[in-house]
Image (tube, rainbow, N blue to C red):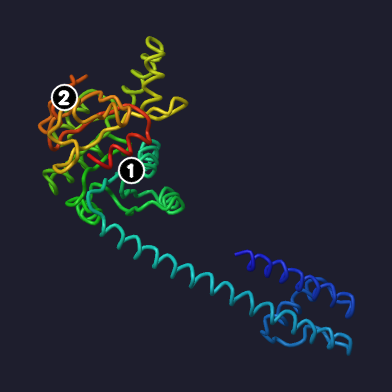
Amino acid sequence: MPNILTALLMLLGVISFGTFGYMLIEESSFIDSLFMTMITITTIGYGEIFPLSTQGRIFTMVLIVLGVGLIMFLFTRITEEVVEGNLRTMYGRLSMKKKVEGLKDHYIICGFGRIGKVICNLLNEAGTPFVVIESNPVVIHELTELGYLFLEGEAANDDILLKAGVKQAKGLVSVVSSNADNVYITLSARGLNSELYIMARSTGTEGGETKLLRAGASQVISPYYIGACRMAQHILRPTVTDFIDLTIHGGELGLRMEELAISDHGKIVNKSLMDSNIRRDFNLIVVAIKRRHGEMLFNPNPGSMIMPNDTLIVLGDYSMIKALEKIV
């Protein structure tokens, strides 16, 4: 693109050079000189607009060499940009389609608005695979710049959901702007995958959460309600709120609260908390144990057993959490 802009500026210079050159040499009018310059450098060949002197003919030959060469270069660059741009777009779409088709146990994010952007940013930082479904061309350009996997279209469309791998996905998050759209997306996704975990955004309007649950949402979140509660808690219990922020998002203390899934063959499976030596070897606090069927044990005692498919919620240094994750 810079080469094209440079060539256009040079072309403007050649046109100005030819126009004022004819005006000076042949004492012609501005319009006649400009017209003579244009038909010369474009090789249209209407003939001489006014009789040319010997100096005028020499000047015309110089103008032809300069102008025709520049015109050819300019059109060549424009053609290259158009062809290469189309090829890059086609290759990018094919590459994107291939990557999306290869996804498994990923998340489908429907909508890339303010909430969708935050979700995608956090998933990207965590290395969790996801694909975005979006229909706004402006937002599509932003997704391209960010390098996120995406599909262009309506998220409620069955074909788009199938292309996004809804049958192989781990979950779907619907965060488009209206309750009605979220209901349609939830209905479509649930119809295609009855086991899919679906989280839907509610705008907070009366009856919105109920409709989304009826449509098949596994969980309904109202950002406005959560935001209001967060603000109220910060007023009522500022120290507790600050501590929770530190443990969830990290901070000066270096603490994190994470969940770890227990495999069938982990080194601490079928052991009690005391025998697992989590506190001794990793200096981590086990805040809770979530059983396979959903039962939650808060502040478990040292004799609590760690069973296969349990989920440990631990608090401590992030590097130690990652070290524990390798053996569970």
The residue under the point 84% across, 87% down is: 58
Query: Crowding near pointer 1: few (<14 within 10 Å), some, many (20+)?
Result: many
Q: Residue 183's image quarter?
A: top left
Earlier sequence position, callout 2 versus callout 1 = 1
User: On the picture, is 277 further left or further right than 34?
Assistant: left
Q: Position of residue 47 (x, y in %)?
A: 73, 88
Query: In the drawing, what numbered circle is on residue 296?
Result: 2
The residue under the point 34% across, 53% down is: 150
Relative to 327, does residue 57 appear above or below in the rendering? below
Q: Position of residue 321 (x, y in %)?
A: 32, 34
Residue located beneath label 1 in the image: 111
The residue under the point 26% across, 55% down is: 103
Amino acid identity at mark 2: Met
Q: Residue 34's image quarter?
A: bottom right
Amino acid identity at mark 1: Gly
Query: In the drawing, what numbered circle is on residue 239?
Result: none
Q: CA distance from mark 2 to mark 1?
A: 32 Å
User: On the picture, is 287 further left or further right than 316?
Assistant: left
Relative to 177, does residue 295 appear above or below in the rendering? above
User: On the picture, is 18 further left or further right than 327?
Assistant: right
User: On the picture, is 281 further left or further right than 76?
Assistant: left
Q: Residue 277's image quarter?
A: top left
Q: Quadrant of the C terminus?
A: top left
The residue under the point 44% across, 25% down is: 253
Check if mark 2's residue and mark 1's residue have beta carbons within 8 Å: no
Q: Position of residue 119 (x, y in %)?
A: 35, 38
Query: Crowding near pointer 2: few (<14 within 10 Å), some, many (20+)?
Result: some
Q: Nearer the viewer, mark 2 or mark 1?
A: 2
Q: Mark 1: which secondary structure? A: loop
Q: Nearer the viewer, residue 100 or 42?
A: 100
Q: Position of residue 129 (x, y in %)?
A: 30, 49
Q: Nearer the viewer, residue 199 or 260?
A: 260
